[in-house]
Image (cartoon, rainbow, N blue to C red):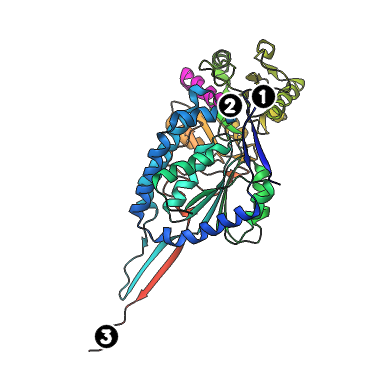
Amino acid sequence: MSRIQKTVSPVDGSVFVERPLADDALIDATLERARRAQSDWQRRPLAERKQLASAFVDAFVAQRDAIAEELTWQMGRPIRFAAGEVAGLEERARTMIELADEGLAPIRTRDKPGFDRWIQREPHGVVFVIAPWNYPYLTAVNTVVPALLAGNTVILKHSAQTPLCAERFAQAFGEAGLPEGVFQYLHLSHADAERIIADPRIDLLAFTGSVEGGHAVEQAAAGRFIGVGLELGGKDPAYVRADADIDQAVETVMDGAFFNSGQSCCGIERIYLHRDIYDDFVPRAVEWVRQLRLGRPNDTETTLGPVVRASAADFVRDQAAEAIAQGATPMIDATTYPLDRRGSPYLAPQVLLDVDHSMRVMTEESFGPIVGIQRVESDEEAVALMNDSRYGLTGAIFTRDYDRGVALGQQLDVGTFFVNRCDYLDPELAWVGVKDSGRGCTLSVIGYEQLTRPKSFHIKHIEEAS
């Protein structure tokens, strides 16, 4: 009997899509196709692989409107913002195509008489990509396109919340003319995904998801000696210094906290304000949040959609209630939002004052439309609090003193540091986390290092006797 995967839409609780989970025969056939296709794909010139990747992007972008609508129904992003994911995929994919020649070029050594020496970048083989629902295309493209450009074949397992995203990848690659077996997808149970990770036909794993999920995939890969790239969670901080442009900081920080209903691994979840600007920043920030319109995401007027499921919303509600019981002050009256009720994915935004690090809301990933704001006395206190976290994905400082901002950034234990910006991936920069935010690197020229292995060539010339 076939097993069925059902995707429940946060928009209205309906089953939006159903798909059969892959059985043993399909899993085995998919792995075999990927393995057989890889050697021929690797031998194709990089110029040809780049051309096919560009054709994929063209085909994908042509379906922008349909992709945006599906995205809204699968995970709840407001339709007015959903097409931005298509634009983001295009930016990242085209950037990685442009960087491929540099990222995959052989490394030449210093001249040594009588020898030729170089280091070549070889593909691992078959790459298994496990992608999440919150930015389903952006997280997947970080690995899928550069892995293919590097000569690997790819199998994608997407979240059960966003299964159509895997199918859209496959459709666009098919229209681009990608050879059979080079890119494939599977709808999988967790147990079957772990079984594939342990399969000797998989050569590299790229996982994006929760810390708990990261532990599970590492255990599944234990003893395999394969590369495991992990892009995990965050509790990302922003610090607004006394010399910051307050209007710019409010707009940027609050958008970084509440865009996508706060469901971003690099979204701002903690804000630290220097005491000199605290009383100026807070009322503007609260007013900014009050302008958000919570509603059905397929309504073009909605600016704050539901979170992915009711249990996720209740988790955030519990964080807020616990913090308030510990002394935090809520600045938003949730009772003025008719859609917000326990057991519903529609969750009112919340700003909490009088918070500290004894509260879960300031230390545990929320992944929802809530942020705590804490007053600090100095740069040194701000940096200490920003580093007081099990996570280390990004950190942001808002200041007009760029040299001081960079100097403070050097002290932060994060993978990406921003000045006067946050919650953004620049595809020309390495995307990497430290501590519980993960391991490995995607994007940028450096991103190709994780998707290849070095192979050294050491050639000694023998002179013929005259």
Tell me the amino acid under the disc marked 3.
Answer: Glu
Using residue 118 as the reference point, say whether residue 20 is left or right of it. right
Height in image: 153 above or below 392?
A: below
Q: For mark 3, what is the residue?
A: 464
**Whole-Å distance between the Cαs marked 2 and 1?**
9 Å
Using residue 120 as the reference point, say whether residue 15 is left or right of it. right
Which residue does the image show at 44% across and 34% down from the upper left? 88
Q: Residue furthest front?
A: 1
Tell me the amino acid under the disc marked 1.
Answer: Pro
- Looking at the image, do the residues carrying marks 2 and 1 touch, with CB atoms under 8 Å apart? yes
Comparing labels 3 and 1, the label whose residue is closer to the camera: 1
Lower sequence index among marks 2 and 1 = 2
Q: Tell me if mark 3 has few (under 14), some (14-19) or many (20+) residues whose alpha carbon lies within 10 angstroms of its own.
A: few
Comparing labels 3 and 2, the label whose residue is closer to the camera: 2
Q: For mark 2, what is the residue?
A: 76
Which residue does the image show at 62% across and 61% down from the upper left? 224
**Whole-Å distance between the Cαs marked 3 and 1?**
78 Å
Residue 108 in sight: yes
Mark 1 residue element: loop
The quadrant holding residue 275 is top right
Lower sequence index among marks 3 and 1 = 1
Residue 421 in sight: no
The quadrant of the image that shows the C terminus is bottom left
Height in image: 135 above or below 226?
A: above
Residue 345: image tag: 1
Mark 2 residue element: loop
Q: Tell me if mark 2 has few (under 14), some (14-19) or many (20+) residues whose alpha carbon lies within 10 angstroms of its own.
A: many
Query: Which region is colored magenta?
Result: 241-260
Q: Nearer the viewer, residue 437 or 356?
A: 437
Residue 438's spot in the image, x, y percent? Answer: 59, 45
Height in image: 459 above or below 269?
A: below
